[in-house]
Image: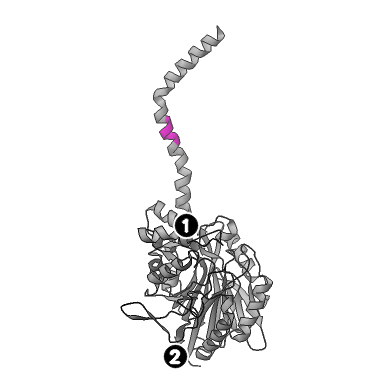
Amino acid sequence: MKETKLKSFMQVWVKKHREKAVSHSIILALLLSIPFFAHKKIDEVPIPENTRPDDVEYRVSMVGDMMLGRHVQEAAQREGEPIDRVFSYVTPYFEQSDYSTGNFENPVIDSNNPEVESQMEDYELHNKDIHLYAEAGAEDALINAGFDSVNLANNHTMDYGDLSLTETLNHMRDADIDLIGIGDVLDSGEAQIDTGDEEEEVMDAGSISYFDINENYSAAVLGFTDVFVQGYSAGDYVGGVLTNDGLDVLQRRIKEAKEQADVVIVHAHWGDEYQVGSNQEQENLAWLLTDIGADIIIGHHSHVLEPVTVVETNNNTSLVMNSLGNFVFDQGWSRTKESTLAQLDFLEDGSADLSFIPMQITDTKPRETKGILKPYRDYRIFRTLRKELDKDLWRVEDSRLIIDMEKAGVLDYGGSES
């Protein structure tokens, strides 16, 4: 009897509330969406406008790992936006710089081309677990953001073997951006390749990008990777990237760059992933590169920030950014989202500073730290970067960690009149 009454009661209750179920569901959905949209609104930061002080004569901007494929591409598609979206907050920093460079952590492959897509599985290197690529058009995102050069000597550029090389060079060779650490051959000299209809100049994986800071002072940029697998290394008759197999070539190029330019900047893809600190191999290479003539070393690969160090040899002193961490990536661990934009400023008074802007990657987009958590985030980032620097070499000013290059004994810059 009791079971019958309970069953009747439940039927009446269900019938009574069925008509209101739809309206209740809509109200609940609206209530649940408030925190989501409110968070997105609160989390928004304004795009910076004036990022360059008046006393900066020349500015070089440098960043770490950039990957425009995988979930970065998916995030853009989800939002119905082009891949350029990843640079929406930081483009002004590059536009207001005179030279910008970073590490491009993937080949560019047109997988929408059925002929290319059908080859990808066959060309995928089987001695690697992770294979990355960005869609054709990613090169335009770099150019539109304001990059002058990108390093492609890293452990993902050749993930799809020769297809990676062919596709990347097809899309980027003639683009308005210098390619560093990748080529048809290594140490090619004046070699030419026959493309059928016409001869085309060979791209050398050890090529150097030069630029003038002023009429009396110039810089050179080149790059290599210490992290690679078989099938990556460029050679006399083999295309690829500049690896440690070509270390003798790298040494010759650094010496060549030192003869032609006042500042030699080297991209170094090295170290251990996710380790907040350099390993012995990094330290040995940093000493060697410095002794040969490298003045600024841009480290990447670990996907996290690493301490900045000053390396002194009998022949030279350099400043080594062991890892600038991720700049555009889709990794979720908190340290992989801590980022920085390094800017080398040559000032009108003849001095030079290297400053670090604290950044956070949110929804694959890098942007300057903001909000109530900014002091905490800045502290974490600066603490890592300055960990191995003497206290008299650095200061925090205008939310930047700034290193005095003269005190560090790096560079010999005397301004326009030197």
Q: Residue at x 52, y 10 (%)?
A: 5
Percent across and percent down for residue 116 are 39, 61
Q: CA distance from mark 1 to mark 2?
A: 43 Å
Magenta span: chief secondary structure: helix
Magenta residues (range): 24-28
Quarter of the view holding residue 227: bottom right
Q: Decide if residue 169 is on the left or right side of residue 299.
A: left
On whether residue 375 falls in the magenta region, the answer is no
Along the viewing direction, whichever of 99 and 202 lies nearer the viewer: 202
Q: Earlier in the sequence, mark 1 or mark 2?
A: 1
Amino acid at pointer 1: Arg
Between residues 252 and 240, which one lies in front from this camera angle? 240
Does the CB distance between marks 1 and 2 fall below 8 Å?
no
What residue would you read off at disc 2?
215
Q: Is residue 322 above or below residue 352?
A: above
Counting from the top left corner in percent of width and height, residue 248 is at 58, 83
In the rendered image, the residue lying farthest to the top is: 1
Tell me if residue 79 comes above or below residue 210 in the rendering.
above
Q: Is residue 116 left or right of residue 106?
A: left
One can see residue 56 in this view: no
The amino acid type of the residue labelled 2 equals Glu
Question: How far from the left and from the top, in percent, is residue 52?
Answer: 46, 74
Viewer-nearest of discs 1 and 2: 1
Residue 70 — which label? 1
